[in-house]
Every structure is written in C-alpha cells, then in structure tokens.
Amino acid sequence: MRVFVLTGAGISAESGIPTFRGKDGYWRNLDPTKLATPEAFARDPQLVWDWYRERRQRIRNARPNAGHEAIARLAHHADEFLLVTQNVDDLHARAGILAEKMVQIHGDIFVTRCSRCDFAEKGSGGSPEPPTTRAVQPQSGRLGAIAPTSEDHCNLPGCPECAAFMRPGVVWFGEQLPWNELQRVESYLDRGACDVVIVAGTTATFGYIIDWALRGSRDGVELIEVNPEETPLSRFATRLVREPAAIALPRIVDELINRGAL
Ligand code: APR
C-alpha cells in the first residue's frame, strides 16, 4: 500500500504546542505570522530569537502524542510512505518516523543557520541552545552597520564563518521552500497515485498543501481529513473526521491495518 500523509500544527496541539492560527497561537500578544518573517528578524533579531528559544524549550518539554505515534505505525506498515509536515518541531521524529520517510517542508526549529553564508548546525530536542560565546562583535564598515552593539545583542548566536547573525533553520513567510525537500515530494507524487492520503491538523493555508493532497489522491483515492474544523480541503475529502488527531488517528490507522490493506 502506498501512503501519503500531510500534517500541520494541529497534530502537535495535544502535545501542548500552540497552533499558528488557533486562539493559543499569539506570543506576547504578537501574531506569529508577523514574527516569522525576515523583516521581523532584521528589525529585532533579539525578539525573534526569544520567541524561537521559548518555542524550542516548549518542544523539548513536550512529548509525541498518540497522533504522532499512529502515523509512525502507519509508516512502519506501509509498503511506500511519505509524510510531509509543515511542523518545525521534532515530535514526528521522536515518535519514530525515519528521516527518509519525512519531509519537514518548513524546516527544523532545532537547526541554526547563518543568515548570510551556508553555515548551519543541527541541534535536537535535547540539545542546549547554541553557545552565544560567538555573539556577533561590532565591527566597522558594512558589517558594523548590521552587527549589533554587543550590549543589545550579546546573546545572539553569531556565525563562526562570517560573523553574521545565525537564525533558526525554518522557512519564514515570503521565503522559498527548500529545493531538495520539494524535489522529494514531487518525485514521490510523480511515482503514481497513492492508496490513501491523510491530511491532519492543518488549515491548508498554502496552495501547495492542497495541490499535493489532490495529486496524491487523484483517480478517486481515499482522502481523509482529520480536523475539528472545516478547511479549504474539506470539500475534496472523501472522509471528514472532525475529531482531535490524537483521538482519531490511532483508530484510522488500526482500521487501515485491520483492513489488511497494509
Ligand atoms: N487535532 C487535529 N487538528 C487540530 C487540532 C487537533 N487536536 N487542534 C487544532 N487543529 C486544527 C485547527 O482546526 C486548524 O485547522 O489544526 C489547524 C492548525 O492550523 P494552523 O495554526 O494554521 O497551522 P498550520 O496549518 O500547520 O499552518 C501552516 O503556516 O504559519 C505557517 O509555517 C507555519 O507551518 C505553518 C503553516
């Protein structure tokens, strides 16, 4: 059986991770969609880093829920499987999904990369924050212009290669999706229709999410939407499950496994 799964923030909600557009999404009364932008980082890198550090800590303290675990079980049973998640947390991975079966299309919050050169480092749920001993030091000329005064930005990680600011390895609004990850999704979908497509916990805000769900479920394949609320994808779904993911997904996966389809 060939399975394709798309997830969003809703699947991590029951692990205590706020969604983006849910009532719990605001941080310090700031709209997350206003913080997750290159402009916000240029304007106030300290504020953006504070937000991401708090989110990293909240994710470290969180645990995968029954929804994450059900998808890991599905991955284990399916002949072919790909999970595309918009989530930058590591709960799918901690639930046991292998990297080769998952695409984090909006990046990974535990990656820290340079805002200018290609330097990047990968932490993990357990890893402490990157050392700020490499805080950006004020320099003259152009770098001086962007390099903060050490008083203000003394705990912002600086790039060991080019001394520019380091930033979280996530895709911000207005930024391109990671090319290699895109190719992985495209080649999986180009290899033929799936037998079942599950979309869980997303508002399907972005056109590519809807496009991938429809391409994966072409030729009348089952498209199951798991979401307490309606989304733009609902009208295309062959089955609507208006329940929380941690409740619905274990049952749906059991059903697929018992159907002997897997
Ligand atoms: N189980 C299933 N779905 C849930 C649950 C739950 N327990 N709780 C909430 N939801 C649903 C909500 O009804 C909503 O449709 O999850 C969805 C969360 O939507 P968003 O907050 O918009 O998150 P997402 O769809 O992942 O956002 C997409 O937008 O902000 C950017 O880059 C960010 O990856 C994010 C992307």
Image: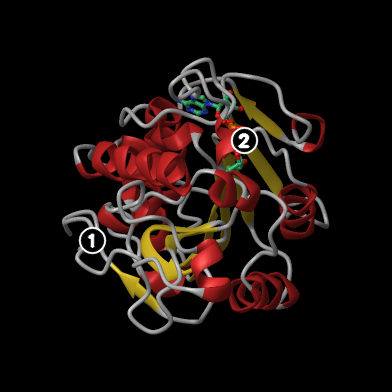
Q: Quadrant of ligand 1?
A: top right
Q: Is residue 29 above or below residue 93?
A: above
| Quadrant showing the N terminus | bottom right
- Kindly identify which numbered label has been placed on residue 33: 2
Task: Give the left or right position of residue 28, taking residue 154 as reference.
Answer: right
Between 259 and 122, the residue placed more toward the observer is: 122
Q: Quadrant of residue 3?
A: bottom right
Residue 251: tell me if it is visible: yes
Report the amino acid beneath label 1.
Answer: Thr
Dots 2 and 1: beta carbons under 8 Å? no
Q: Quadrant of residue 223?
A: top right
* Residue farthest along the top direction in this orientation: 23
- Respond yes or no on whether mark 2 lies under 8 Å from ligand 1: yes
Between 248 and 211, the residue placed more toward the observer is: 211
* Residue farthest along the front direction in this orientation: 140
The residue under label 1 is: 132
Where residue 48 appears, as percent x and y from the top left, is 46, 43
Q: Quadrant of residue 98?
A: bottom left
- Kindly identify which numbered label has been placed on residue 28: none
Report the amino acid beneath label 2.
Answer: Thr
Where residue 154 appears, as percent x and y from the top left, is 28, 53
Q: Earlier in the sequence, mark 2 or mark 1?
A: 2
Residue at the image position 23 percent from the left and 40 percent from the top: 63
Residue at the image position 32 percent from the left and 56 percent from the top: 150
What secondary structure is marked by label 2?
helix
Task: Report the mark closest to the observer, 2 or 1.
Answer: 1
Q: Dot 1 surroundings within 10 Å: few (below 14), some, or many (20 or more)?
A: few
Q: Dot 2 surroundings within 10 Å: few (below 14), some, or many (20 or more)?
A: some
Q: Is residue 67 above or below residue 258?
A: above
Where residue 253 appears, as percent x and y from the top left, is 43, 43
Where residue 159 appears, as percent x and y from the top left, is 37, 74
Residue 1: tell me if it is visible: no
